[in-house]
Amino acid sequence: MSIIEVKGLTRKFKDLTAVNNVSFEVNRGEIFGFLGPNGAGKTTTINMLTTLLKPTSGQALINGFNAVKDKDKVRSSIGLIFQDPSLDDKLTAKENLKFHAWLYGESGEKMDQRIDNMLGLLDLAVRKKDLVETFSGGMKRRLEIARGLLHYPKVLFLDEPTIGLDPQTRNRIWEYIMQLRQKEDITMFMTTHYMDEAEYCDRIAIMDKGEIIAIDTPKKLKDMIGGDVITLITDNNDQATQEIKNKFGLEVNKKDDGLLITKETGEEFIPLLFRGLSMKVKSVDLRKPTLNDVFLKLTGREIRDEEASTYDKAKKFYKMRIRH
Amino acid sequence: MKKLFKEIYIIWLREMIRYWRTKPRLISSLAMPLIWLVLFGSGMKSAFAIGGGQAGFDFIQFLFPGVIGMSILFTSIFSVMSIVTDRQFGFLKEILVAPVSRVSIALGKILGGSTTAMIQGTIMILLSPIVGIKLSLGLVLAMLPVMFIASIALTSIGLVVASRMKSAEGFQMIMNFIMMPMFFLSGAMFPLSNLPNWMDILSKINPASYAIDLVRQVSFKFMDTPTQVIDLLSIDLFGHQVNLWTDLLIVSVFGVIMVTFGVFLFNKSD
């Protein structure tokens, strides 16, 4: 049974259609990812799934409940980690969790224990009595993850969970997420514009301009490229091109001083290639296709990580400015 | 019903903790009215005497309830700014995705704001002997419910504005536009008698006038104020003198309308 079922979900803001007729299902227990550039409609979709935004049309069922009609039941079924920080700086780590538990109607000794457990799991136990305003960005994120899972949600939504964090902290956050996934028996729904993060997902929906243009496992999506990318440099590239064409029937493209070949299961093809060539091979490089190649193939554009990180920085800078 | 009260309590409790922990806000909000009362009051006292300088009544006695009213007005309205800052810094989302009704959130915020206003009003009353006001238990006890009703009505004005505002700066701008005229036309600093006609009309439309008058009328009961002075200062509405109970009725009705309107707007906002 699917834990999330979305049919024809659409959201318009005046003239702009942010999300256009989106349909998909998420299976219980999987990590499902939305990948796409900034402004693709990922956050708008999450906001509709989490009852924060009313869809213009279409419907979304989460844990069997309608996101428009059964708001409270949906809200009890989900945990959320927002793109932007959403902690109360003037409360301590523990108070933030306690406040959260109360909001979800949970209190008592069992909950206190749960709070201490979660703080321990995310290595925040020592700092539990400190005000959140003294925390680093990574610690705040960890606390938000602990909070999102506190009330035993069925689905955890993570909207750009590592945005604005440095690479080391990002890896740590992912270690925690994967570890918790095993302990908590939970479905995760995440959005990201980082390629490497999308690889953590069991299935990915690639989103562009408000529409889903492909849904599959990361592996199958990359298989769409038609194989691995092999770069070959030999003593005699012209002769090599002829031999590859004749013996293997493959298309060969020249790039700088190398030859480019696309072939499925390239790691098995390389030994055959070596045996079939008469000249000396200087170097060979095998590259698996990335999700960026997939996005490029589908849209003709790249999801540019550099561009995204400049955007993050600007966003972070603006946040800091208004805070002081 | 029990769920509703519990939710309101949680939202209220957080406001209280934040109020207590934000020390600069705590100090400045207490210092400002005190400065008005001590410096402005003492200065003006020598400048003129009300009612032809009757014995037993001076400007401080007039100003004291006004300053309490002002303190309530400012604190109430600005306390709701926490909705805007919560929204600005993302915390509001955490509350909005929880299975908690928007009505509880709005009511919790209103009660939180009113409580801080009441605490400040009470501290002002307790400090009143500094400027020579006779303090009595009766005065404190009578003022509490009055301050409560007045601050709920005033906090709700803030909620109406806050339910739509996205930035604290914007909220402050709008509130200053609303609050300054409200404050100057409320009779907190000078009597509303003998005003030019246009100002007289505005002051009578101003709900804060009745809130201030309510606070003043109640405190006069404990200050041996001459009846002549009370008559002179009370608001004249359609040829009738507004008494304590009329004030109370007007402020309560206004409060109910504003709470309903504020909760309605907050409920509708995304």
Image (cartoon, coloured by chain):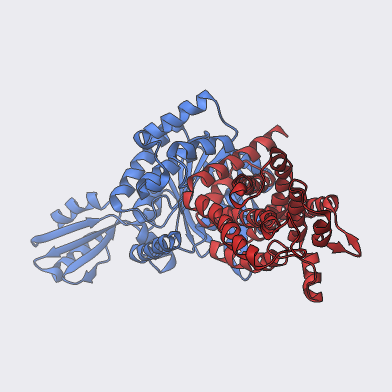
Residue with the most extreme right position: B239
Q: Is residue B260 visible?
A: no
Vertical placement of residue A314 versus B249, above or below: below
Chain B colour is red
Chain A colour is blue
Task: Tell me which residue sits at (18%, 72%) in the image.
Answer: A256
Q: In which quarter of the image is residue B208?
A: bottom right
Q: Position of residue B193 (x, y in %)?
A: 79, 67
Q: Where is residue A154 in the image (x, y as percent from the top left)?
A: 53, 36
Q: Where is residue A181 in the image (x, y as percent from the top left)?
A: 42, 36
Vertical placement of residue A27 versus B59, above or below: above
Q: Which quadrant of the figure contains the C terminus of chain B?
A: bottom right
Vertical placement of residue A60 versus A285, above or below: above
Q: Which quadrant of the figure contains the N terminus of chain B?
A: top right
In the visual, does A266 lie left or right of A60? Answer: left
In the visual, does A148 lie left or right of A55? Answer: left
Task: Tell me which residue sits at (18%, 56%) in the image.
Answer: A273
Q: Nearer the viewer, residue A18 or B149?
A: B149
Task: Tell me which residue sits at (58%, 64%) in the image.
Answer: B172
Q: Is residue B213 visible?
A: yes
Q: Where is residue B185 in the image (x, y as percent from the top left)?
A: 72, 67
Residue with the most extreme front position: B55
